[in-house]
Image: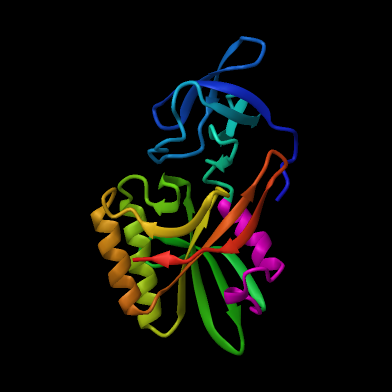
Amino acid sequence: MRFAEPLQPARLIRRYKRFLADATLPDGSEITLHCPNPGAMLGLAEPGMQIWLKTGRGKLKYGWVLTELPSGAMVGIDTTLPNRLVAEALAGNRIPELAGYGEIRPEVPYGENSRVDFRLSDASRPDCYLEVKNVHLSRQAGLAEFPDCVTARGAKHLRELAIQAQAGARAVMLFLVQRPDCREFRLAADCDPAYAAAFHKARKAGIEALCYACDVTLQGIALAEPLPISD
């Protein structure tokens, strides 16, 4: 997925109210921008960090897309992008574990007032219910973690996937790591013990878990290699 326009650099002043941030542009002007991420963004929203912005389409002129780490690595913080990345990958059969389905439908109602990110269908096998989670937390070199804060909604998704698996469907949780500097994935159980417990219970009920890294540059974000999931 290539960005539609060149991203613009800025220096973060502060992030607040979850979806807002202030930053300084290269010309010294200060702006308020949209932060499309409801999580804690640990290590990715420190004052003074270099961030990269796109032109906004709402009330705010700019939207935050990437955080540049001191190492130079880019981290995607926009939680609206993973589903677009996965949709492209599914259409191109670039996720071998999920390849070969004849129909791919996004945002299909299921469970208790929920929508599954994708339902994959084919006459030759059971439907596959696929949830996608954005991952950007890394507190240890090379290790990606999820979640970075309490996510009751995420635990609900696990329970609903487990119900589908027990009913005979295929149910898959795909963790998409929007950063190129991680080689392994695990749950951040200390950030949300309830989510970790729900995950292990859902695995026992039959859901599958996949994790893929991303190549992240100023030009775009692309699905990269699968990452091992550790307990």
Q: Quadrant of residue 158?
A: bottom left
Residue name at image x 36 percent, y 68 percent: 160
In the rendered image, residue 25, in percent from the top left (x then y), is placed at 62, 17
On screen, residue 57 above or below 30? below
Q: Is residue 61 visible?
A: no
The secondary structure that dominates the magenta segment is helix
Residue name at image x 62 percent, y 9 percent: 28
Depth check: 14 or 16 in front?
Answer: 14
Residue name at image x 56 percent, y 21 percent: 11
Residue, far top: 28
Q: Quadrant of residue 166?
A: bottom left
In the rendered image, residue 78, in percent from the top left (x then y), is placed at 54, 42
On screen, residue 223 above or below 34? below
Depth check: 226 or 23 in front?
Answer: 226
Q: Left or right of 56: which side holds 197?
A: left
User: Which residues make up the magenta segment?
Assistant: 82-101
Q: Quadrant of residue 167?
A: bottom left
Depth check: 112 or 182 in front?
Answer: 182
Please say whether residue 224 is one of the residues in the magenta stretch.
no
Please say whether residue 86 is one of the residues in the magenta stretch.
yes
Q: Left or right of 138: which side holds 11?
A: right
